[in-house]
Amino acid sequence: FVFNSLLRSLPPAPACSPLPLFRHFLGLGVRPNRYTFPLMLTSLSSLCELSVVHSQVVKSGFARDLHVRNALLASYAACDPDLGHAEQLFDEMPRPDVVAWTTMITAYRNHGRSFHALNTFRRMFAASVAPNRVTMVSALGACAAHGAVDTGIWIHQYVQKQGWELDVVLGTALVDMYGKCGHVVEGVRVFSEMTERNVCTWNSIIGAFALEQDGEMAL
């Protein structure tokens, strides 16, 4: 599909809007498919453009397509300052999957709304939707910001029960959560169990000691 190939070649937002190209192909009688809209959405940076594409999604009959719907949700979560549009779209989903739930949890965390992030995390489990690693990393970030150490410990136990490997991203999120919640010993334990560490991991453990006012260990 030539149109989709051209969309892939566009620079990321906000350097170049895909809307002129989209209108041109529509004028030529070319119709989008389920892969067209997610490609377009990655090149959008404003709510105005997003609303235009959203209306085209509806007109083209892809409003119920899970792939397209999740791409729309991610774009609203990124572009919408108060997340009102994202929340409305999410609430209209009959059965959000783990991608949709994780998008909302991450969006709330990124907007400093850790309480809403954790509440959404709990709602996801109540809906019997299993999390993935990205879900847990975002939820741990919300735990760290909100001081919700009990939820953070529960996430750690869940990860252990599932037998998930403690990779650098998940491990660092746990270290950061324990450190910011004042449980430095647990953070050090996770840190010592990690086979791979990056600068964020080291910063998290140093920050944990600093919060504990243990300057010698931090250095």
Image (cartoon, rainbow, N blue to C red):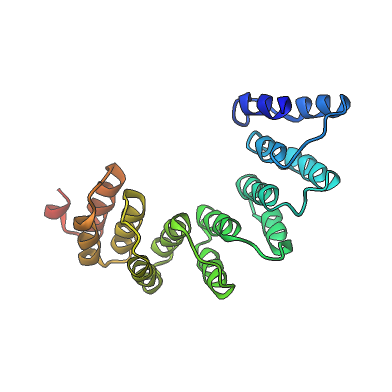
Foreground pick, 151 / 21: 21
Residue 17 x %, y %: 70, 28
Residue 12 x %, y %: 59, 30
Residue at horizontal 76%, vertical 25%?
A: 21
Q: In the image, 13: left or right of 34? A: left
Residue at horizontal 26%, vertical 67%?
A: 183
From where the camera sits, is residue 206 visible?
A: yes
Outermost left residue: 216
Quadrant of the image occupied by residue 30: top right
Residue at horizontal 71%, vertical 54%?
A: 85
The quarter of the picture where the N terminus appears is top right
Outermost front residue: 1
Q: In the image, 200: left or right of 24? A: left
Is residue 33 placed above or below 101 in the rendered structure? above
Is residue 157 placed above or below 64 in the rendered structure? below
Residue 29 x %, y %: 87, 28
Residue 208 x %, y %: 25, 57
Foreground pick, 193 / 79: 193
The number of discs equals: 0
From where the camera sits, is residue 212 visible?
A: no
Q: In the image, 108: left or right of 30? A: left
Quadrant of the image occupied by residue 188: bottom left
Foreground pick, 34 / 91: 34
Quadrant of the image occupied by residue 123: bottom right
